[in-house]
Image (cartoon, rainbow, N blue to C red):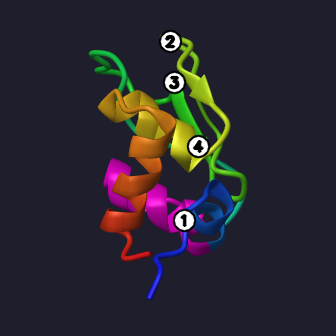
Amino acid sequence: MSKRKLNADDIKQSVNPADFYRHELNVPLKKHGWQDGGLCPFHSDNKQGSFFVNLETGAYKCFACVANGGDIISFTMALHGLRFAEALAQLAHDWGI
């Protein structure tokens, strides 16, 4: 039995951005749109209100350190210093895909 190659679309269809960010950031988030994501995980942040995530697209942005990205894959890459394929593998493992 051959193993199907995992791709970004598989991850994006399987992992809901709202669930992902609730888990990764451990903050209460509403259901839709841009949300205050708590403290930025990309710098020594001690003031909430600068890091936001979009629960529909998975985008994120910090207005203090200018970290920004397009989806949960780029967030995982930036947070853990991973390459694209490594981030896909980690997300697949972490989310049981």
Which residue in the rendered view is the most extreme toward the bottom? 1
| Amino acid type of the residue tagged 2 in the rendering | Ala
Q: Tell me, yes or no, whether the two marked residues, 1 and 3, touch with CB atoms within 8 Å.
A: no
Comparing labels 1 and 3, the label whose residue is closer to the camera: 1
- Residue 97 colored in magenta in the image: no
Q: Which of marks 2 and 1 is nearer the N terminus?
A: 1
| Amino acid type of the residue tagged 1 in the rendering | Lys
Q: Nearer the viewer, residue 24 or 74?
A: 74
Q: Tell me, yes or no, whether the two marked residues, 3 and 2, touch with CB atoms within 8 Å.
A: yes
Q: Residue at x 72, y 52 (%)?
A: 57
Q: Residue at x 57, y 63 (%)?
A: 11
Comparing labels 3 and 4, the label whose residue is closer to the camera: 4
- Residue 27 colored in magenta in the image: yes
Q: Where is residue 22 in the image (x, y as percent from the top left)?
A: 42, 60
Q: Which label number is shown at residue 53? A: 4
Q: Tell me, yes or no, whether the two marked residues, 2 and 1, touch with CB atoms within 8 Å.
A: no
Q: Which of marks 1 and 4 is nearer the N terminus?
A: 1
Can you say whether 67 is above or below 3 in the image?
A: above
Comparing labels 1 and 4, the label whose residue is closer to the camera: 1
Q: Which label number is shown at residue 64? A: 2
Q: Which residue is drawn at 66% across and 71% down?
A: 13
Q: Tell me, yes or no, whether the two marked residues, 3 and 4, touch with CB atoms within 8 Å.
A: no
Report which residue position mark 1 lands on: 5
Report which residue position mark 3 lands on: 50
Q: Residue at x 35, y 61 (%)?
A: 23
Q: Give the range drawn in magenta.
A: 14-31
